[in-house]
Amino acid sequence: MKKVILSVCVLLVGFSSLIQAQHIKSPSEFLGYELGTRFTRHHKVVDYFKYVSSISKNVKLEKYGETNEFRPLYVVYISSEENIANIENIRENNLKQAGIVQGTAALKTGIVWLSYNVHGNEASSTEAAMQTMYTLITTKSEWLKNTLVIIDPCVNPDGRDRYVNWYNQTKSTPYDTNPDAIEHHEPWPGGRPNHYLFDLNRDWAWATQVETQQRLMVYNKWLPHVHVDFHEQYINNPYYFAPAVEPFHEIITDWQRSFQTQIGKNHAKYFDKNGWRYFTKESFDLFYPSYGDTYPTYMGAVGMTYEQAGHGKAGLGIDLANGAVLTLVDRVKHHTTTGLSTVEVASKNTTKLITEFGKFFNNTNLKYKNYIVRGNHTKINQVVSLLNKHQINSYRASQKTIKAFDYYTGTTKSVRINSGDLVISTNQPKGKMVKVLFEPEAKLSDSLTYDITAWSIPFAYGLHGFATTYSIEKSSTTPQTEIVKNNIQKTAYAYVCKWDEVADAAFLGKLLEADFKVRFSHKKFSVDGNQFERGSLVILRGENKHLQNFDELITDISNQMNEKLTPASTGFVDYGADFGSDYVAFIEHKKVAVISGEGTSSLSFGEIWHFFETQLQYPLHIINTAYFNHTDLDEYNVLILPNGFRASEKQLKKITSFAEKGGNVIAIGSALNSFADKEGFNLKRKKDDDESDEDDTAKKDMKKLFIPYNQLERESVKSSITGSIFKSTIDNTHPLAYGYTNTYYSLKLSASAYDVLEDGFNVGYFPEGTTTTSGFAGVEALEKVQNSLLFGIEYQGKGKIIYMVDNPLFRSFWEHGKLFVANAIFFN
Ligand SMILES: [Zn+2]
């Protein structure tokens, strides 16, 4: 009898799990087409994840945000029923393991996070995300007993849908594998970036984009042990997986390195069996901290990039050089295989994974115990807000004198700590990330890297940095963010506002939009005993009589924007220029246009667009290169040429005539080549030594002939700069540099260099003897930096062309450069 009951029970249990298995539709069944035979639009992907989470107890779905185009962002938690029921406990124990939450950890579950489709047009991976979840819960559930898998099926839904919608509209039926077919040629800007055309795989550390900001909140709540970022590369490339190649950042642990290899070998097993081509240990390094492999690595995970052939070129199928056809079906299969294999290895090594993860957060061996930043109050607050995004702690120290390394002089000396200085200790769980972000110079184990090699936050934010090798006591008082409250001053002759950061420019923009008449002072001045620097804004009551409620309006706007207004009782200054002087110049309400579209860098255009809409909050008119020639530029005061734009002869005439009539042209990065070495312009490209001296050329060319073939790539490094910090000299008496001191640390992004202008203003330049402050520069490239231009102005008729050699808006993280752009727009 007992036996009978038992077997009935077994039957029932078996039957119920059978019901569950039968009831979960595969992606193909749910979507109504074989996975990989179409690109699935984002909302259908979301539907599938919602569907599975609604019927499976192994799956929990969580919405963590929304994109600029209002698409939802989700993560899905996949594990055993028991773990899912216990998920909050696992999370808390994991943070205990990292030392972020106090207490002894009792963690038995490994955490693997799989991120798909950060580049929107690398679209096979989101399809693979669906299949990976399905396989895990149906046939690989034994791995889920000790492993929690977190899947972000689509990091960049706006980019993905931009690609998928375009592809679906464009493709032939059946699809055309001929590489010439239109379906293999994505139009500008392509689906890779997000709405503002930012590369989200360069944004993890700076978190300038809403997708990143919202993702970091959930990521830092979890801190997985393994993180994979799924990508696609050129169509003829084999599959790439870990281990990565040098340079590795020095904080990467031996464990992180060796586990990459262990995972890679497991993938290789499956790829070998199927006869799929792959490579490891090449091309993809682990240095720049803002990638989907490095950021997780610096936060304790084994972070990896996997690359399948395909991206926006491949469509549903494309002919390859070797005569084979690469199909979406294959691409999905490969990404599914590596995703599953990653979970398999993690599941087989859970105990070790958890132990080593815990060890990562011990930071007692770091040389510098603290980084200290000093300077502008608002910029310090910006640093605090960036640190908050990474859940990194900072504090203010008590006033005392200490020994510290000075970023400006490169020496260790006595420094008096001020109450406003911000201290960021490495003696906290995320101390390694603190080191990566703040150290004056990251140790580069190999100069062959294709991203920037320097990013130190004090330089990026224009703050004075210090580092100490011992701990500093916390001050008992925590300064609160100052909330400005201006009061109406009906007797004021004028209101005055300082000018030294983008927030001041945003305030000016708001005033101009509200029809205020605003002036700025070309001289330092003092009024009623208050001192102001060049560029300070002066708003005269007598000039704003057209505004009803002038005082109420201006105090409202300034309070809203947290801008301090100083009422002035008189226009008669103690020193400087009186408010009626021509030195207190009128600011025109500028109408600004930017060129976008084919022939411009979508990244650079996106940075300008994002800057205007999210920071400056000032109207920007976007003109596409397709009809630029027919646009009436008389409508505008400022025209911005993004990096990558190269004017045709006709366009150059049009731009020159715009300037001659009084327009301001701002050329960024390689857009300078529209003017360089052209008749009628002073701008001259610095030639490579080989180009300038014939004898030398012969010598160098001979030398080049004997460079061993296997060293050619290394040799090319000598003439390259991929992103390093250089100290420039600034003429801060020129309006373009108001709000700055006479030095500025610039992030130089290429080896292109221009001579200082013979006729015009050299507002920023790199003097003779310049070396890198931080980062790598090849010897030949460094030679060209000497006496080269950074910011220059050349007059054309009534207007001017403003040259910005280094792009101050690059990835929107070089906060200190942004005021140059505002100055270029508003100050004549
Ligand atoms: Zn990619």
Image (tube, rainbow, N blue to C red):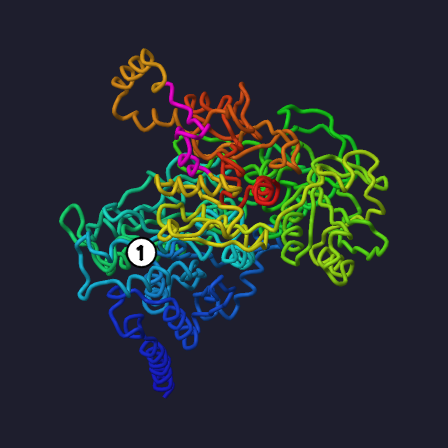
Q: Residue at x 65, y 55 (%)?
A: 510
> In x, y percent, where is residue 251?
51, 37
Q: Is residue 499 above or below residue 316?
A: above
Element type where label 1 sits in the image: helix
Quadrant of the rendering where the C terminus is positioned: top right
Asked where in the image residue 1 lies, by quadrant, the reply is bottom left
Q: Is residue 497 above or below residue 459?
A: below
498 relative to 611 in the view: left or right = right
Numbered marks: total: 1
> In x, y percent, where is residue 338?
32, 54
| Three-letter code, disc 1 | His
Closer-to-camera residue (327/644): 644
Q: Residue at x 52, y 23 (%)?
A: 771
Q: Verify whether residue 108 appears in magenta.
A: no
Give the crowd class for mark 1: few <14, some 14-19, many >=20 residues within 10 Å.
many
Asked where in the image residue 691 lies, by quadrant, the reply is top left
297 relative to 558 in the view: left or right = left
Tell which residue pokes out farthest to the bottom in this image: 1
- Residue interval drawn in magenta: 669-689
Read off the residue under disc 1. 335
Q: Verify whether residue 686 appears in magenta.
A: yes
Q: Is residue 140 above or below residue 706?
A: below
Closer-to-camera residue (720/270): 720
Disc 1 C-beta below 8 A from ligand 1: no
> In x, y percent, where is residue 563?
72, 51
Q: Residue at x 86, y 53 (%)?
A: 491
Would you say residue 104 is visible in this rendering?
yes
120 relative to 439 in the view: left or right = left
Closer-to-camera residue (91/788): 788
Closer-to-camera residue (168/612): 612
